[in-house]
Amino acid sequence: MALPKYAEGHSKEALVRITCQSCASNRFGLLNKPFAATINVGVDPEIYVTCLKCGNKQFDAENWYDV
């Protein structure tokens, strides 16, 4: 899968697909802790993802998907 320009250059370990609440669309986001999407989903409240398009921080891991 080709990444859009705004998501290029980021580590795949920290990159996830999200449903951004601000953009109201599927976007790529950057986790604040690599590999957190598959290991600690819903366990660690300090893990969040930042939308790479608008910068919105999301803490609800229900809408995060590994790339």
Image (cartoon, rainbow, N blue to C red):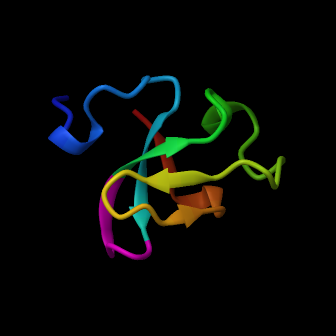
The residue at the point 16 percent across, 30 percent down is 2
Give the vertical position of 53 relative to 11 (above or below). Answer: below
Q: At which x and y percent is residue 9?
A: 30, 26
The residue at the point 83 percent across, 47 percent down is 44
Quadrant hosting residue 27? bottom left
The residue at the point 72 percent across, 48 percent down is 47
Q: Does residue 52 appear left or right of residue 61 in this picture?
A: left
Q: Which sits in the foreground, 17 or 30? A: 30
Q: At which x and y percent is residue 58?
A: 58, 63
Q: Quadrant of the N terminus?
A: top left
Q: Does residue 47 appear left or right of residue 14 in this picture?
A: right
How many numbered discs?
0
Q: Which sits in the foreground, 13 or 53? A: 53
Q: Say if the magenta span includes residue 22.
A: yes
Give the vertical position of 11 relative to 36 (above or below). Answer: above
Q: Quadrant of the C terminus?
A: top left
Q: At which x and y percent is residue 8?
A: 25, 31
Q: Does residue 51 appear left or right of residue 48 in this picture?
A: left
Q: Say if the magenta span includes residue 16.
A: no
The residue at the point 66 percent across, 62 percent down is 59
Q: At which x and y percent is residue 5?
A: 16, 39
Q: Which residues are magenta?
A: 21-27
Quadrant hosting residue 32? top right
Give the vertical position of 49 relative to 3 (above or below). Answer: below
Give the vertical position of 22 relative to 5 (above or below). Answer: below
